[in-house]
Image: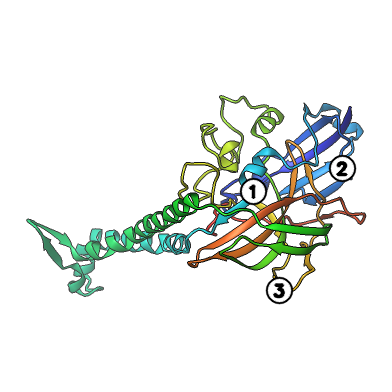
Amino acid sequence: MHRSVQRVRYPPFDHENRDPEGIPLVEVLLESETPPPPEFKIGNDKSWLLEWRPVREKDVNLPMISKEVTYTTLPFLMRTRNGWYIEPDPLHKISRKTIFPGVFTLVTALLLHALEPALINIELIPNDIFTSISIGPLDYPLMIVLAFPVFMLPILVRVLANIKDIRRQNEYIANPLPNPEIEIKNVSTEFVEISNIDLPKGIVATRARIQVGVAIPEREVLLRATGRRRIGQPPPGMSTELPERRITTADEHGTGVGESLPMTVGRGRLLHLEPMRIQDFGPWELLRDFPLKISGPPNPWPGTIYSAMIAIHWEIVIEAEKDGGLKMKWVRPITVDFPSKEIGFQDLPIRSGRSEA
């Protein structure tokens, strides 16, 4: 058996509002039949961190876990990050941007209404804005009547976007696309060379890129390493466990809080691609002439490796458009060897957990 140390501080779903140092740094002594990969550290101890290194004398008291280490893509990633995906409707992004203006407008209207007598006495605001209008047998303050539709706008836009998304998903389920045939020659952390792409009829590919991300750590391992029970209070940064029928990667492990994906059709696999919270990209390359070299991310990342705590996942993403204007992505996991050069950098690229962002 081989032993190594893993140190992880993975960003929670709402990481924008969290201080990384307020999230526990999880350290484990990993025992596996497969030798560990070359040592690497990405991130830093005062922020989000992923470190995999040899065992040192001071590590003897760390909690020990016996888990598989593999270079084969994990089943849940093959299920959720492999194949064709539909782009969420752009209205989702508009809906999220209008939440703050809607709430601010309604709160301001309520505050002005509450202060109406004082404001009239000091003649600070014209009396006209405090007019009431009749709707049926009752009178309502004009300000609130005008503010309420602004407050409801994000909800209405979101509902409309979900209806359009569900319609597109049902259309795809009724007429699914076969996977493209892609020939790959060379694969490394620096570039991937594509010899040719043969797309199904009715699809036009526009561009492609390489991206690398880190999957969410297994919930059971995090609980064991932090000394928490499954039925007890989870540690900071982790939500209450959700039902097993939930199929998004965040919800599977109970580490997501909020809506990571727009509304999905509950038949078969997901048709929206869930973002990874730690993810880095190479530049987009136009799909014109082959063979084509697609550059990897600029940071010195490790190669492909999967374990319960740290799972480095590489993939090719192709943007395409179906007849009728439906924007889609095709995603394929790739296995990338560890580079011979030094691995590591100080600042992890953290992304929003929401797909529309």
Label placed on residue 306: none
Element type at marker 1? Answer: loop
Q: CA distance from mark 2 to mark 3?
A: 37 Å
Front disc: 3 or 1: 3
From this view, report whether residue 160 is shown above or below residue 243: below
- Left or right: 345 in relation to 348: right
Residue at 44 percent of width and 64 percent of height: 94
- Confirm whether residue 109 shows in the render: no
Q: Residue 270: x, y in percent?
A: 54, 46
Q: CA distance from mark 2 to mark 1?
A: 23 Å
Front disc: 2 or 3: 3
Name which of mark 2 and mark 3 comes first in the sequence: 2
- Quarter of the figure that contains the C terminus: bottom right
Q: Residues within 10 Å of mark 3 (few under 14, many from 20)?
A: few
Label placed on residue 37: 2
Q: Amino acid at mark 2?
A: Pro
Q: Residues within 10 Å of mark 1 (few under 14, many from 20)?
A: many
Q: Residue 180: x, y in percent?
A: 66, 57
Q: Residues within 10 Å of mark 2 (few under 14, many from 20)?
A: some
> Which residue is the site of mark 3?
288
Q: Residue 21: x, y in percent?
A: 68, 46
- Left or right: 104 in relation to 149: right
> Which residue is the site of mark 1?
81
Name which of mark 2 and mark 1 comes first in the sequence: 2
Residue at 41 percent of width and 58 percent of height: 164
Residue at 53 percent of width and 59 percent of height: 87
Q: Amino acid at mark 1?
A: Arg
Q: Residue furthest left?
A: 137
Element type at marker 3? Answer: loop
Name which of mark 3 and mark 1 comes first in the sequence: 1
